[in-house]
Image (spheres, rainbow, N blue to C red):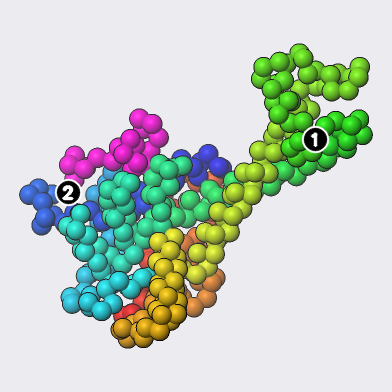
Amino acid sequence: MITLKFLQTCFTSPGVALPNKDNKNDEVNASSIRWRASEGRGGIACCNPAFSPEEEEKLVSLYGEQKKNIVENDCADLRPSNRFTYCSKCQIWRPPRCHHCSACNRCILQMDHHCPWVNNCIGYNNLRLFFTMLTFLLVACYYAISMTIVPFYELVKEDLKHGISMNFFGLALYQELYSIFYKAGDYSKRHEGEEVPKSVLWIKVVFVIVVTAGCAISFLWSYHFRLLCAALTTIDHQATLTQKRNQLLQKLRGNAPTTKYDNLRSSVNPFSQKGWRKNVHQILGPNLWYNLIPSIGKQKILPPYLPKDDF
């Protein structure tokens, strides 16, 4: 499942706002735009992801038509915002929460971040796959820890019993790693007259690796789950923190709010449905158990939640 979700995240388009046909001499088609894996646009090595302009335009159309004169000068920097913005690099009007990625040089719908581990942007169309992949990785790390913690504990007790010097996680781990890869025969005896199988050494190495990876993935998973519950992307969250910092600096300096929107910029999220369950289902789908079933077909995603009121 980890490999399946990883490949699906790599080869699934995050949702891209393509240049308008009016801005080009010819129509946008698969021959005029290619997504190469070497450019960080999905895929692996020489395997490039498929490109379908019809599918991308269908995703953009879910956000509705651009409203006229909705961007005001005094609140154009409000984030998260439900207003269309203009990309000077792609020269297009893009839907709300659509941002230009400097890594792959394209406008991503509901962009969360550009992930180098999957060689692709994480956005509206593949955020669910990315989060599901993190979930399976986390479960795999916890399973590996549960299978190795008892043998690891017994080995630590045995080392302490025989007075083995301790320098890392209670073990002479560096010496044992050196014995595995370079001097397999020199360190075969851990205690006097006792042969130590190589599986004992590997248990120590694997336990340290899965604990380290488990801690890192746990932090990453909890961070993204918190964003899912709040209906925020990584960009929205970082922008909100910046706005809070600026407001705090203004308060400390004694500067009054300059616009009527300043008091709302850190507290109002127009994309939150006033309930963390609804926000999670918006990304992961109405049936959460469906994400646990191996499926190579195209998964149906919910249309983006668009608030009726302007913020």
* Residue at the (59%, 55%) spot, across then down: 219
Please give the label number shown on residue 32.
none
Q: Is residue 305 visible?
A: no
Q: Nearer the viewer, residue 134 or 165?
A: 165
On the image, the x and y values in percent for residue 276 come to 54, 72
* Residue at the (79%, 28%) spot, across then down: 200
* Residue at the (48%, 51%) spot, across then down: 130
On the image, the x and y values in percent for residue 87 come to 22, 60
On the image, the x and y values in percent for residue 49 come to 34, 39
User: Mostly what secondary structure, the magenta segment?
Assistant: loop
In the structure shown, which secondary structural element does the residue marked by tag 2 occupy?
loop
In the shown orientation, is residue 264 left or right of residue 287? left
Give the residue pinned by disc 1: 166
| For the residues bearing labels 1 and 2, Cβ distance under 8 angstroms | no
- In three-dimensional space, the C-alpha distance between marks 1 and 2, rounded to whole angstroms, equals 64 Å
Give the residue pinned by disc 2: 28
Kindly indicate the quadrant of the structure image that contains residue 88: bottom left
In the shown orientation, is residue 165 left or right of residue 204? right
Q: Report crowding for label 1: few under 14, some 14 to 19, many 20 or more residues within 10 A (C-alpha).
A: few
Q: Nearer the viewer, residue 70 or 181?
A: 181
Of labels 1 and 2, the one closer to you: 1
Of callouts 1 and 2, the N-terminal one: 2
Give the residues in magenta.
Answer: 29-50
* Residue at the (36%, 76%) spot, across then down: 307
In the structure shown, which secondary structural element does the residue marked by tag 1 occupy?
loop
On the image, the x and y values in percent for residue 11 come to 39, 42
The kind of residue on which mark 1 rests is Met
Kindly indicate the quadrant of the structure image that contains residue 29: top left
